[in-house]
């Protein structure tokens, strides 16, 4: 089982008990360091005290279960205003929202396309970019995240 799946299993109920929702879990290498990050969300937004409270509750369980053999840093973070959309339910929850689609290969000379999310089905993303409606195959898309407009 992947580290992120294992952490998700035991962290989700703890996060819910604290009045928040688990948004994502990532285990990444950045330079020589490894990071286990849990991203949380709640209605009205997450603040530092939410992150601290959840960190204090999950840290001893990580020590007990020891899901990662090597040394790592553990962080609990807000999902953020410009959060990444990954799961089908993420796309459904933010239908009609401004997004940024990052592509593996340029389309019409662009690798990043600001758009409005209009559809999601079987991994395909349909957006409205200007006056054009575009559907991207899952294999074309490197990342989709919410976009804050000022």
Image: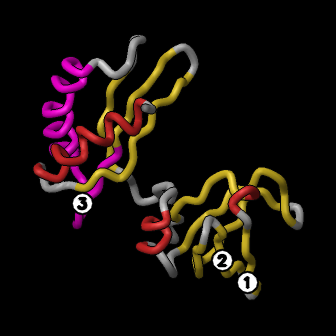
Q: Nearer the viewer, residue 3 or 22?
A: 3
Residue 120 rendering spot, x and y as whole percentages:
58, 74
Q: Are marks 2 and 1 in contact (CB under 8 Å)?
A: yes
Left or right of 27 in this view: 16: left
User: Is residue 43 inside the magenta stretch?
Assistant: yes
What residue did someone put label 1 on? 133
Residue 3 rendering spot, x and y as whole percentages:
41, 30
Q: Main secondary structure of the magenta part?
A: helix
Q: The N terminus appears in which quarter of the rendering? A: top left
Q: Residues within 10 Å of mark 2 (few under 14, many from 20)?
A: many
Q: Are marks 3 and 1 in contact (CB under 8 Å)?
A: no
Q: Residues within 10 Å of mark 3 (few under 14, many from 20)?
A: some
In this picture, which residue range is highlighted in magenta? Answer: 39-65
Q: Nearer the viewer, residue 122 or 90?
A: 122
Which residue is farthest front?
1
User: Gap in Å between the C-alphas at discs 3 and 1?
Assistant: 32 Å
Q: Is residue 133 above or below residue 89?
A: below
What residue appears at the point 59 percent right and 74 percent down from the top-left corner?
Answer: 121
What residue did someone put label 3 on? 42
Sequence-earlier tag: 2 or 1: 2
Q: Nearer the viewer, residue 76 or 3?
A: 3
Left or right of 28 in this view: 13: left
What residue appears at the point 35 percent right and 53 percent down from the top-left corner?
Answer: 23
Residue 9 rendering spot, x and y as whole percentages:
28, 41
What residue did someone put label 2 on? 127
Residue 85 rendering spot, x and y as whole percentages:
50, 59
Left or right of 73 in this view: 147: right
User: Gap in Å between the C-alphas at discs 2 and 1?
Assistant: 6 Å
């Amino acid at each position: 089982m992947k580290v992120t799946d294992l952490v998700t299993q035991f962290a989700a109920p703890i996060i819910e008990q604290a009045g928040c929702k688990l948004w994502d879990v990532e285990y990444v290498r950045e330079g020589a360091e490894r990071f286990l990050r849990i991203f949380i969300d709640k209605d009205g937004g997450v603040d530092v005290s939410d992150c601290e409270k959840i960190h204090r509750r999950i840290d001893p369980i990580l020590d007990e279960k020891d899901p990662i053999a090597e040394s790592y840093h553990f962080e609990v973070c807000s999902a953020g205003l410009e959060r990444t959309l990954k799961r089908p339910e993420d796309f459904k929850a933010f239908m009609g929202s401004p997004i940024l689609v990052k592509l593996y290969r340029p389309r019409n000379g662009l690798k990043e396309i600001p758009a409005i999310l209009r559809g999601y089905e079987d991994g395909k993303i349909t957006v409205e970019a200007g006056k054009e409606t575009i559907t991207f195959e899952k294999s074309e898309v490197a990342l989709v995240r919410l976009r804050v407009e000022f």
